[in-house]
Amino acid sequence: MQMNGKPKKLLECLGIQELYPPQSEALEKGILEGKNLLVTTPTASGKTLVAALGIASQVEKGVSKAFYTVPLRSIAFEKKMLFEAIGRCLGYRVETIVGDLEVPEWKLRKADVIVSTYEKMDSIIRKNPDFLTEISVGVIDELHYISDPKRGPIVELIVSALKYKAPQIQLIGLSATVSNAEEIADWLNARLVKTNWRPVPLREGVYKTGLIHYDNGKTEPVSQKTGNPTIDLVLHASAKGGQSIVFVQSRRKAVSIAKKIAGKHKWLNYDHKVSQEAAEKIMKTPEGTELSELLSSLVSKGASFHHAGLSNQQRTIIEEAFRKQGVNTIVATPTLAAGVNLPARYVIVDEYVRYEGGFRTPISVSEYKQLAGRAGRPGYDEVGMAVIVARPSDDPEELINYYIKRPPEPLHSKLAGKRILRIILLALIASGLARRDSEIDKLVMNTLYAAQSQSRTVIGFILKESLKDLVKWNMVVGEAGVYQPTRLGLLTSLLYLDPVSSKFVMENLRKKPLKSIFGILHLVSMTDDAQVVRLQRRDIEDLYRLIDERYTELIVTPEKFIEEEDRYLQAIKTAALLEDWVNETPLREVESKYNVGPGDLSSIVETSLWLVYALSRIVQLFPETQDLHSFLKKLGERLKYGVKEEVLELTRIKGVGRVRARLLYKYGYKAVADLKKASIEDLVKIPTIGYIVAREILEQLGVHVEEAEGKEKREREGILSFT
């Protein structure tokens, strides 16, 4: 098909002379004519380019904007880099909105393309549903997340809101694994592009006792050098010049196998210079803990582990080293497959069973396909290899039939259930998207849940019950089928809280409005929205002792939660961790004491910061809790920086942080006013503050650095000439 204008220029910018077969099919099915499309093709088959062509075609008209939404921040930043490069070439503006990265509304309105996470796009819609009318094309990447219990309802609400509020929008859904693609395409009112074509062919097999059994009946021998099947496969791959990603189900096993692989580093092929540079970078990250030391040691030997317990910086260093051949093998939990475009020649699935609720449960076929899809690097490998390591009791043929030859499970809506529908219902009413019974009914009937439901009567009943709850909790008011949000309901929705969480914190706080840091941290950790520390049996005695010691500070006392002991104790442990964090307990000590990694700590702190911020807003609505606002606001700042109140002013200076703030305080710089009197020469005497950091600090405070340096130099020269 002939292309002109921006789509043609897009291909020129990217240096693409020939399209992949799925991309050609997308052109034939109307991607440039504004047709809705569902593209379900394997990883690395060019789905993103299909979306970019659709965006370029619509943006060229100059009448509206496009959005590209993804499930995870890591994917969002990946797409941000791509679309910013495209934007520079095609002359359109790109804005990215993820996590705590806020973008002013005027910037969003001026943007041609908005890249966001699902949550941020949902937030934009909640704050201003009319924004949808300014969009001409919307891309939902990783659409299979619609089956995810956490993010699925958000995806479904975004799509349903688009279908209801702006049916003229071109919808483009992208996914590698959709077995019921026809059903999902019907829901999207989309044409379907579905193929198994890959730029790098995939060979799949099962390994057991020295042989890889392939799905075509052939076998391949593997030298059993170590007695460990996974490590033998890694060495086999390395001997053939390939890198490997090994997938396991637990962090502990990821670390354990990475250690064993590093122990065989003499048999690994990797770039030693790159690995040493990466190891040094890891030791320079702020998380200078035992975990960092172990990670650095392994990376220097060409192996690494990768899981959510690592910080973003640590993970980025590992991924970059892997791309540059400095790491031969990464042993990862499944989060790597979901969040990063990091293919390898070999994908080794070490575990296909995980523990859930105390039982061993096989992973889904869909999850296996996501892992296997990482095999094969376009432009580098002639074939990608995905190998499952069979347990001694399992038959390779059965595993081939179950995981390799079966299609992934169908995608199903996760809107079912009163709790989820209640959240969605409040969002619809609070945003103004739907406030009448007829509007609510119409929008809900646009959901996948309604499309897949056997009975609309059941949906109507659950909606009615959910509305009763919201009215009873004073979040919604209305009569004669027309509803309005109360101030509490509006804030709850805008702050992205579960209505149950909002109700829980305020019921307890209004009865007992204590200004207790430990009590507040425990209160928010008790909500369903909280992220908590894992509870270990050895913790229980210490936690009950802590409850006894701090009982008078608790807003939620244990008597009401006798039947939910674990939940209550997890919240106590999380509150203790967060209190240590704001009291400047060193990272090494926090991580060791609570058995968390830097990534865990960052995630727990970030979630708690959001909940404390939300609480600081909500307490202003009630006379009996209004005086808690400033207390909670200050606690939020302390959570953000991990410091005591006395150094808050110093931590607000960019580049200072919790460690440097405490050192500045120790050396007599207790406020910004003290720092303004300092010279660069004074500041560089303080540990961790070099010349560049000292200069940046003084420039932020409005100190004319050149003048100060000149004065110092004249004074030094005067002293030297005098001597």
Image (cartoon, grey):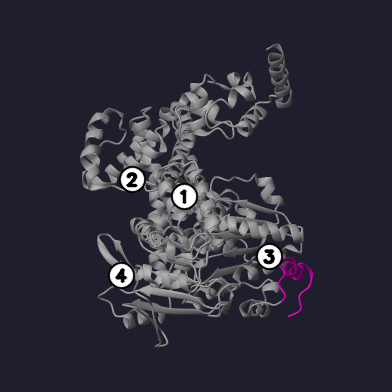
Residue 555 in sight: yes
Furthest residue toward front: 723
Furthest residue toward bottom: 217
Residue under label 4: 227
Q: Earlier in the sequence, mark 1 or mark 4?
A: 4
Do tag 2 and tag 4 residues touch (Cβ < 8 Å)?
A: no
Give amino acid for label 2.
Answer: Asn
Q: Residues under labels 1 and 4: Cα distance?
A: 72 Å
In the image: residue 143, left or right of residue 414: right
Q: Where in the figure is residue 70, as x and y percent of width and height?
A: 55, 60
Residue pictured at 36% horizontal, 62% vertical: 249
Query: Which span is picked out in magenta?
Result: 1-17
Q: Earlier in the sequence, mark 4 or mark 3?
A: 3
Residue 361 painted magenta = no
Q: Secondary structure at mark 1?
A: strand
Find residue 595 and name its label: 2
Q: Quarter of the image containing the C terminus?
A: top right
Furthest residue toward right: 5
Give amino acid for label 4.
Answer: Gly
Find residue 479 and name its label: 1
In the image: residue 672, left or right of residue 456: right
Q: Residues under labels 4 and 3: Cα distance?
A: 52 Å
Q: Residues under labels 2 and 4: Cα distance?
A: 31 Å
27 is higher (above) or lower (below) than 301: below
